[in-house]
Structure formats: C-alpha cells, structure tokens
Image: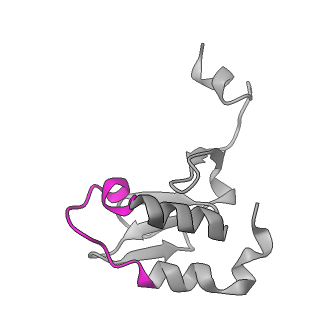
Amino acid sequence: MRRRDRLGERDRSYPVRMCVGCRSRAAQSDLVRLVDDGGVVTPDTTGHLPGRGAYLHPDPRCWQSAERRRVWPRAFRATGRLDTSRAAAFFAEESRWSGAR
C-alpha cells in the first residue's frame, strides 16, 4: 500500500505531520511546532526557529500524553531531561484552546 493511500487522501497538497502526544497525523497548520532551544522546549509560533521540531495538537490531552510518555528527548534527539516549563505555560493559557481538535 502506498503511503498516500494510508493517509486516506490521494491528492494531498499540504504538509502532514504527526502529533507527538496522540501520534495521529494532521495538517501541519493544525499543529503547534515545538523546538529544543538550548535544553528548553519552546513553542515556535512563527515556524522559523532553527533546530529540530516536534509537533503537537493545541489540546491539553495531547500535552498530557506527551508529558506522561516522556517524548521530548526522543523527539528532539537530545540526551537527558529538557525543561518543558516554557511550553507548559504556553499550553496552559486558556485562550490557546479555542482551536482544539
């Protein structure tokens, strides 16, 4: 089976990424990009910060799942623990959840 067929769309004209929280695929524009900024997980709202990115739905359940599964070192190919406080504060803001899936 071809990869396009597995995604359920034959003529996809937008980038698809996987959420590290729920591990489902979604359009890149529906996800929040996070980057490892010197050991600190930082939301990349512009999409232009350098470095390896990981994507997450703007949904508290996805954030909790990612934290519970400890995905950050693996997602960023980092060694040791990463500080997630900046990203946690970003996801804690109630106004961010208006676009939750």
Q: Residue at x 37, y 62 (%)?
A: 72
Question: Against 18, is 98 above or below?
Answer: below
Residue 22 location in percent, x, y?
A: 59, 52
Q: Nearer the viewer, residue 66 or 99?
A: 66
Quadrant placement of the C terminus? bottom right
Q: Residue at x 43, y 70 (%)?
A: 49
Q: Residue at x 31, y 60 (%)?
A: 73
Q: Which residues are magenta?
A: 71-85
Could you say where residue 62 lies in the image, as x and y percent from the top left? 60, 62
Q: Is residue 98 left or right of residue 41?
A: right
Farthest left residue? 79
Vertical placement of 82 versus 3: above or below?
Answer: below
Q: Nearer the viewer, residue 26 or 85?
A: 85
* Residue 40 is a magenta residue: no
Give the image location of residue 47, x and y in percent: 53, 66
> In this rendering, would 54 be left or right of 11?
left
